[in-house]
Image (spheres, grey):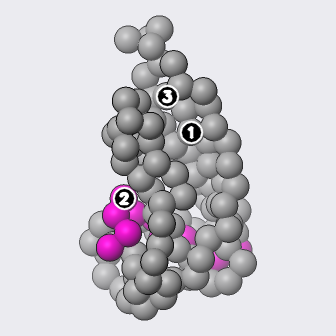
C-alpha cells in the first residue's frame, strides 16, 4: 500500500521551455492527486509538458486544464503518469496530496 504524500511547489511562469512534472505516480499504483492552487496566479495543468511549454501555453485549450487561484481539483493518475504546471503570473504555488486511488484492502 502506498504511503500518502503531501507537498508544496513553487510554480514557474508560463514561457519556460523546460517544465518538469511536479508529481509522478509510482510504477505500480493508480493515484488520486488532490491539487490546490495556493495563488495568486492562474495555473495551467497538463499530463504532458508539450501541452504547456513555451510562450503560447495559455493560448488554445488542447490537453490543458486551467485552475484559478484558491481553487482545487482532483486528478486520477495511472502508474508512472506525471502532472505538469505553469502559472500565468509570478509568485504562484500549489499544494498537493497524493494517495492510492484504490487502497489494497478496498479491492
Residue 58, placed above or below residue 43: below
Name the secondary structure under disc 3.
strand
Measure how far apart labels 2 and 3 are at the Cα level: 18 Å
Q: Residue at x 42, y 53 (%)?
A: 82
Measure how far apart labels 3 and 1 are at the Cα level: 7 Å
The label number, if any, that marks residue 12 in the structure image = none
Measure how far apart labels 2 and 1 are at the Cα level: 15 Å
Tell me which corner region of the image, top left, top right, bottom left or bottom right, holds residue 51. bottom left
Look at mark 2 in the image and give the residue it sits on. Answer: 47
Mark 1 crowd level (few <14, some 14–19, many ≥20, 10 Å Cα): many
Outermost residue on the top side: it is 105
Of residues 41 and 49, the one drawn nearer to the viewer in this rendering: 49
The label number, if any, that marks residue 98 in the structure image = 1
Is 37 placed left or right of 102 in the picture?
A: right
Confirm whether residue 98 shows in the render: yes
Q: Residue at x 67, y 83 (%)?
A: 90
Confirm whether residue 30 shows in the render: no
Of residues 17 and 43, the one drawn nearer to the viewer in this rendering: 17
Look at mark 3 in the image and give the residue it sits on. Answer: 100
Q: Residue at x 45, y 29 (%)?
A: 101
- Residue range highlighted in magenta: 40-50
Residue 14, placed above or below residue 5: below
Q: Residue at x 43, y 91 (%)?
A: 55
Taking the magenta stretch, the answer to whether it contains residue 49 is yes
Which badge, 2 or 3, comes first in the chain's sequence? Answer: 2
Name the secondary structure under disc 2.
loop
Amino acid at each position: 500500500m502506498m504511503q500518502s504524500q503531501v507537498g508544496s511547489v513553487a510554480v514557474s511562469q508560463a514561457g519556460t521551455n523546460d517544465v518538469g512534472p511536479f508529481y509522478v505516480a509510482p510504477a505500480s499504483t493508480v493515484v488520486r492527486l488532490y491539487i490546490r492552487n495556493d495563488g495568486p496566479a492562474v495555473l495551467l495543468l497538463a499530463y504532458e509538458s508539450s501541452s504547456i511549454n513555451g510562450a503560447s501555453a495559455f493560448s488554445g485549450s488542447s490537453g490543458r486544464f486551467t485552475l484559478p487561484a484558491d481553487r482545487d481539483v482532483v486528478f486520477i493518475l495511472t502508474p508512472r503518469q506525471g502532472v505538469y504546471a505553469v502559472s500565468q503570473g509570478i509568485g504562484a504555488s500549489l499544494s498537493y496530496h497524493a494517495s492510492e486511488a484504490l487502497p489494497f484492502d478496498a479491492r
